[in-house]
Amino acid sequence: MPTTLSEQSPSQLVDRAIQENRLAHALLIHGQNLKQVEEFARELACKLMKIDLSENLEEALVRHPDVFFLRPSKKSRIISVADTRELIRKIQHSPQRGDRKVAFIFEVDRLNASAANAFLKTLEEPPLNTTILLLTTRPHSLLATIRSRCQLFRLPTSVQTFDDERAIAWLDSYRAWLSDLLEKRPGGKASVPSYVIGLYGLVERFRHTIESITKETWKTLSKQLPDDLADDERIAMESRISISLRQDFLAAIETTTEDFARGILPEHPDAANKLVDSVQVLEDATGLLRLNMKAEAMLESFLLQSLRIWSS
């Protein structure tokens, strides 16, 4: 049975487990925010590999000969059995530096069936002095046999914020659009085309904002990476930036919707029911992203249903 650790902060639990030399060979690290999960895992790996935490952690880990990475690849964003077996082969060797190895499996829920079954044997008979970090935002999508062989670390949900002015401006426009729907402005049948035009404007701005922030973030990060980093690794890292931003954005949309509903509740008692319906619609639409649906198509679906909910 897995050990679920929730009484203390994950960092405290990790530090104590390392000090007492009882950290499990496989850790399933999960939470609602992909970026938060990956940052926690990198810090943990650096502690295990005795890397100074004041360094650029991602660069230090990428350069380390005893740190290995497995990510979803290609347009299908699936972790294949071939890539999984290559990771298994690499971690069987003795460490080149120090006495420990660390392997990351990003978005482990993207293992296909063959890859998951191939990986099971490694969890049952793990290599010596090797810690495997399985990262996901969807732990229940994994095989129960994989979860049962890992120590579980659930990261608490943090408040999602955006410092980027474009994202903040988008959320302000979304809030104003909700207000117009609720008050049925400008009124009459003329409202419908106005709302729809506003909806598609939000979709296009959402796409552009995600793309712009991703490019700027990647431009900064790519300068810090080694020149000999494989193209597949670079593509995967850029993809992770976009996915993390998208998840943060969607979480912020949910928070903004909740704040809006709470603010109008005294004048609109039905806002509570509208909020429940909106959150459910957003969660359903977000689930479509797992089927490789484009983010802007998912947002369009959510906003169209929100139009019906808030204007009814």
Image (cartoon, helix red, strand yellow):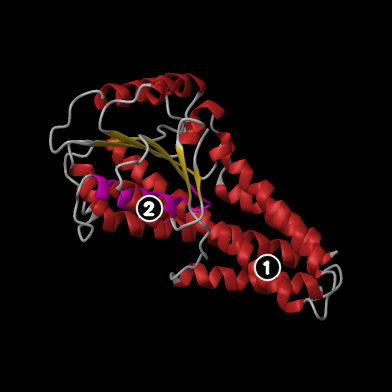
Q: Earlier in the sequence, mark 1 or mark 2?
A: 2
State which mark lies toward you, 1 or 2: 2
The stretch drawn in magenta includes residue 163: no
x, y (%) of residue 88? Answer: 32, 23
Prevalent SS, magenta region: helix
x, y (%) of residue 2? Answer: 50, 36
Residue drawn at 20 percent across, 36 percent down: 66
Q: Is residue 237 visible?
A: yes
Magenta range: 30-48
Q: Residue furthest front?
A: 20
The stretch drawn in magenta includes residue 41: yes
x, y (%) of residue 72? Answer: 42, 34
Q: Would residue 243 appear left or right of 47 to someone viewing this image? A: right
Q: Mark number for residue 258?
A: 1
Circle 1: residue type: Glu
Q: Please, is residue 110 above or below residue 256 in the view?
A: above
Q: Residues within 10 Å of mark 2 (few under 14, many from 20)?
A: some
Residue drawn at 76 percent across, 77 percent down: 264
